[in-house]
Image (cartoon, rainbow, N blue to C red):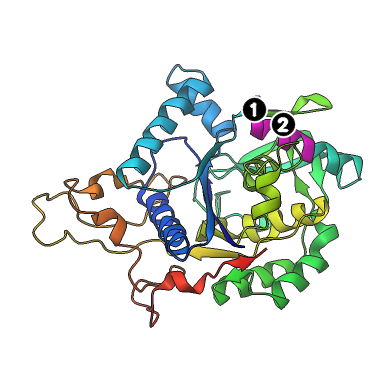
């Protein structure tokens, strides 16, 4: 039986979604529909990453609990996907019990086999990006190199994943397969690995809004294991009901934004290797923007342009305006026709770009 498993990133509901989220989700939906039309058994996953300090602070600023805060935003996300006719098969939330149990199981397994150890961390941290940085990577004035905002000096005891242990194996996998697309991102990640991988902080003692470390109540599990594991927790990995995992894993395509390629192509495959799981078939980075002019004969002036957006930088344009008058799918058609998703919109393929992500027989 030919099966096809495609995922979007799980989006961070610290505020309303911007147009980039819609771009990736519509592209994934087009791929899912394409493979269904071919008769392939298809599974399309999307969802939300709902833990972390950024959400904790945003909820506090609005006088809400974190779960109240994310519940409201997630409801809006689902309404938006319904308006855009997104045909996902499952919507995973990291606050769901099914996800929490799998994440704790993963953390304990990695700890028991020696791939996670406890140590102390001292360094610079960017809350909007949820990323630790060494001083040499910072912009002048101690600013985050990604979002340009000030970083904070953090010192705490944490658990670390032995990322460096899997560097050589990961490098071989990337070089010998077409796991990372496009080639420019592949070369970028190879260069990053060759500079040397450091072990990864995978828990926080100063963040309470998260999944507790199962054997240490003072620690919560950090985003790398919490969020990235959604791709297998949604399939029931490590549970009695793991039929979907056995049927669909490994994923055929992780469709991600270009700003999170490193997380999906370096951290995630190393975690999978440590768990003894197969790595995904492909991780493809989508472009940051494209134009979507108002369709002809459409009475609504609202469908105008797709704007480059970033929630971490605060430059946010919501996709709700591009749903137009409800009688024409302007927001859906912009990303899809004959465009290579990982390049500038002017680059085209001789046929529909969806055909370049084939399903695999299992």
Left or right position of 313 against 291: right
Give coordinates of residue 95: x percent, y percent: 59, 29
Q: Is residue 191 visible?
A: yes
Compared with residue 230, is residue 216 higher up or lower down, i.e. above or below? above
The 10 Å Cα crowd at callout 2, few under 14, some 14 to 19, many 20 or more, is some
Quarter occupied by the C terminus: bottom right
Q: Is residue 304 left or right of residue 184?
A: left
Q: What residue is drawn where x is 16% and y is 46%?
A: 325
Q: Is residue 89 left or right of residue 349?
A: right
Relative vertical location of residue 277 with respect to residue 214 in this rendering, above or below:
below
Nearest the camera: 185 or 239? 239
Pick whichever, 320 or 162, lies toward us: 320
> Which one is in front, 57 or 116?
116
Question: Foreground: 208 or 122?
Answer: 208
Q: Is residue 155 visible?
A: no
Which residue occupies 37% across, 33% down?
A: 76
Secondary element at tag 2:
helix
* Residue count near mark 1 (Cα–Cα under 10 Å), binned few <14, some 14–19, many ≥20: few
- Membership of 184 in magenta stretch: no
Q: Which mark is residue 97?
A: 1
How many tags in the picture? 2
| Residue placed under numbered mark 2 in the picture | 101
Task: Tell me residue 310's x, y (percent).
Answer: 42, 50
Report the magenta residues as a range.
Answer: 97-106
């Amino acid at each position: 039986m030919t099966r096809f498993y495609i995922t979007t990133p799980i989006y961070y509901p610290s505020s309303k979604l911007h147009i980039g989220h819609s771009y990736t989700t519509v592209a994934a939906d087009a791929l899912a529909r394409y493979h269904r039309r071919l008769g392939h058994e298809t599974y399309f996953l999307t969802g939300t990453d709902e833990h972390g300090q950024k959400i904790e602070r945003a909820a506090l600023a609005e006088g809400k609990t974190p779960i109240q805060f994310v519940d409201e935003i997630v409801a809006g996300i689902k309404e938006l996907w319904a308006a855009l006719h997104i045909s996902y098969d499952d919507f995973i939330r990291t606050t769901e019990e099914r996800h929490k149990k799998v994440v704790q199981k993963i953390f304990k397994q990695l700890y028991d086999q020696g791939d996670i150890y406890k140590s102390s961390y001292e360094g610079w941290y960017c809350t909007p990006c949820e990323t630790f940085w060494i001083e040499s990577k910072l912009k002048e004035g101690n600013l985050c190199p990604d979002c340009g905002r000030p970083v904070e000096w953090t010192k705490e005891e944490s658990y670390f994943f032995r990322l460096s242990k899997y560097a050589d194996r990961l490098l071989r996998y990337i070089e010998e397969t077409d796991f990372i697309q496009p080639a420019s991102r592949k070369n970028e990640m190879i260069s990053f690995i060759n500079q040397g991988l450091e072990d990864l902080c995978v828990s926080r003692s100063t963040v309470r809004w998260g999944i507790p470390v199962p054997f240490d109540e003072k620690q919560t599990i950090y985003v790398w294991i919490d969020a990235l594991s959604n791709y297998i927790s949604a399939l029931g990995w490590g549970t009695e009901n793991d039929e979907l995992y056995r049927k669909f894993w490994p994923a055929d395509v992780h469709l991600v934004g270009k700003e999170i390629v490193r997380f999906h192509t370096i951290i995630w495959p190393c975690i999978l290797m440590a768990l003894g799981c197969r790595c995904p078939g492909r991780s493809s980075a989508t472009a940051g923007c494209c134009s979507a002019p108002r369709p002809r004969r459409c009475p609504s002036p609202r469908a105008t342009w797709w704007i480059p957006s970033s929630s971490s930088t605060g430059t946010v344009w919501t996709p709700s305006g591009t749903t137009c008058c409800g009688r024409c799918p302007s927001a859906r058609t912009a990303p899809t026709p004959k465009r290579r998703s990982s390049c500038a919109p002017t680059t085209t393929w001789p046929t529909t770009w969806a055909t370049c992500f084939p399903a695999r027989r299992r």
